[in-house]
Amino acid sequence: MPENLPSSSVGLVRPAVMHFDEPLELECRRVLPKYDLVYETYGTLNADRSNAVLICHALSGHHHAAGYHSMEDKRPGWWDTCIGPGKPIDTNHFFVVSVNTLGGCHGSTGPATTNPETGQPWGPDFPMVTVRDWVTSQARLADRLGIDKWAAVIGGSLGGMQAMQWSTQYPERLAHAVVIAGAPKLSAQNIAFNEVARQAILSDPNFHGGHYYLHDTYPRQGLILARMVGHITYLSEDAMRAKFGRDLRSGRFHFGFDVEFQVESYLRYQGETFSRNFDANTYLLMTKALDYFDPAREHGDSLEEALAPAQCRFLVASFNSDWRFPPERSREIVNALVARGTDVSYGEIETDKGHDAFLLHIPEYMRLFSAYMGRVAEEVGNGPA
Amino acid sequence: MVRPDLEIIRERIPRGARVLDLGCGDGTLLANLRDTLDVRGYGLEIDPENLATAVEKGVNVIKQDIDEGLGNIADNRFDMVVMSQALQAVQHPERVLAEMLRVAGEAIITFPNFGHWRVRSYLLFRGRMPRSPLMPYRWYDSPNIHLCTVHDFEQLCREQGYRILERELMDRHHRGGPITRMMPNLFGELAIYRVAR
């Protein structure tokens, strides 16, 4: 709990909800008749509405990216290291919009929402949403907020995929795309990890075919396992060794299957916390959206062709110890852009923090991110009206 | 530091050219080319602070180690590739040269001439590895692992079949005069070459 909000914080923030009555035709060819998007904004929109940036969140993220909801909050939003006064996404200059993706479980319409046709929660019947669908829905939110063109669309991991998708789906509606710890598509290994996570949920007896809401329960164990395996892939081996080594909780072996090693304790804690705050059906949907994302697929597997419509400038960044979306994957994006003569800068940051690094305060990363966003701020006239 | 060769390089870049700058440092050259000649280029750089400074200037800069090759860049992707005072610091200068002339039709290369009389006399009279404003390092901490002379460079070009389109030698402060032109390997301190396949 912060006793005083730090001056580098956007302070106390409150989510807003935008309701959409216009049906949304999805990539899976189903139609969502109406939906809500929950979002937060930080900073002030300038007079010519040119300083708006969109934050796209990753697999387990949500709209609460910065600041605090109350003075009782233990921690600020998930990207508070990067959003706020004087931070890379400087709210003295930018109007920041952070939206919970469709199918999410933090307020935007998703599997836990009541299906108006049945009066029951959508559950497993919620349509499969893709990165393209998210971007379509975000564009509608931009319309409603009166934002014709984003100064930048920014995201890490799955959020970076959304930024990339923006650049080709609405090329004239963004000036910059910032793709951090991203990938042009998932590898077989990535999909394999997602599948293990999904199977953990699907095989939990409390899953009830996705209708667990009706049974007043949820697949807690499945979610815990899904998060545990996911979390391993977010950390590097070096980071795990540094953080836990082979440390034992009690200092000696107990010759049993209870938690003994610190790393076990940590993973279980992460899993349990996550299981209380995340909807299993949303997790299934989000991992599928990740698996399906492959913009080159419709272009003869040519990423260069897929990115051809992009008109914005790019910042691509990766982390050398990230083995979930390693630097090679970011370089594929960079190479495709260079091949077409699209403006791009690329940083490969040295850290042992693995995939999670994109959320952390790493000086080299902050320096590069601030340098790039500073340039974007100059373009939009440096500050609110 | 103001690089004395940047102006000479700039004069040799056609307006609107597609330029690749290997070891682009803080992006000074690319920013200048963009502002004065409408050049849209990319720089490759490995130092993070240089990279961020180049980004601040709004130039395209990519973190990439030249020693690992340019395999990610297609043949003839660029009109001109520039390497300013970095050839002597790469692992395999001959391979880098070949790569440069694969991705672009022409290359501008500058390097400190190890055949300059000051360098020669430093070694001759002091008996120690030469140091100069262009080569300020000590033998054990120098990134310059492949220093060469004008003669060495031209021999390599001949062996590889590269055409030398232009050669300019500078002394410490000015462009070379007649004496530098007459005996470039002795009086040229910084060599600037424009070469093609």
Image: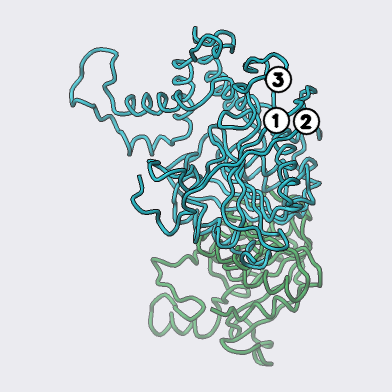
Chain colours: A cyan, B green
Mark with earlier residue (1, 3): 1
Tag 1 residue: A35
| Residues under numbered marks 2 and 1 in contact, where contact means CB atoms less than 8 Å apart | yes
Q: Which mark is residue A24?
A: 2
Q: Is residue A329 visible?
A: no
- Residue A69 on image: x %, y %: 47, 43
The residue drawn where x is 67% and y is 71% is B31
Describe the element under mark 1 as helix, strand or loop: strand
Q: Of the residues shown, which amino acid type is indicated by label 3?
A: Pro
Chain of the residue that carries numbered disc 3 in the rendered image: A
User: Tag 1, which chain?
Assistant: A
The amino acid on which the numbered mark 2 sits, given as a three-letter code, is Leu
Numbered badge on residue A100: none
Q: Nearer the viewer, residue A174 or A194?
A: A174
Residue at 34% across / 35% down in the picture? Answer: A241
What is the tally of numbered marks visible in this picture?
3
Picture quarter containing residue A213? top right
Task: Name the mark nearer the viewer: 2 or 1.
Answer: 1
Provide residue B78's location: percent of width, then percent of height.
77, 59
Disc 2 from disc 3: Cα separation: 15 Å
Question: Would you name the residue on which mark 3 appears?
Answer: A116
What crowding class fits label 3: few (fewer than 14 Cα within 10 Å), some (14-19), or many (20 or more)?
few
Q: Residue at x 58, y 11 (%)?
A: A211
**Relative to the observer, which residue lies in front, B159 or A355?**
A355
* Precedes in sequence: disc 2 or disc 1: 2
Q: Position of residue A356 (x, y in %)?
A: 47, 40
Circle 2 SS class: strand
Q: Is residue B104 visible?
A: yes
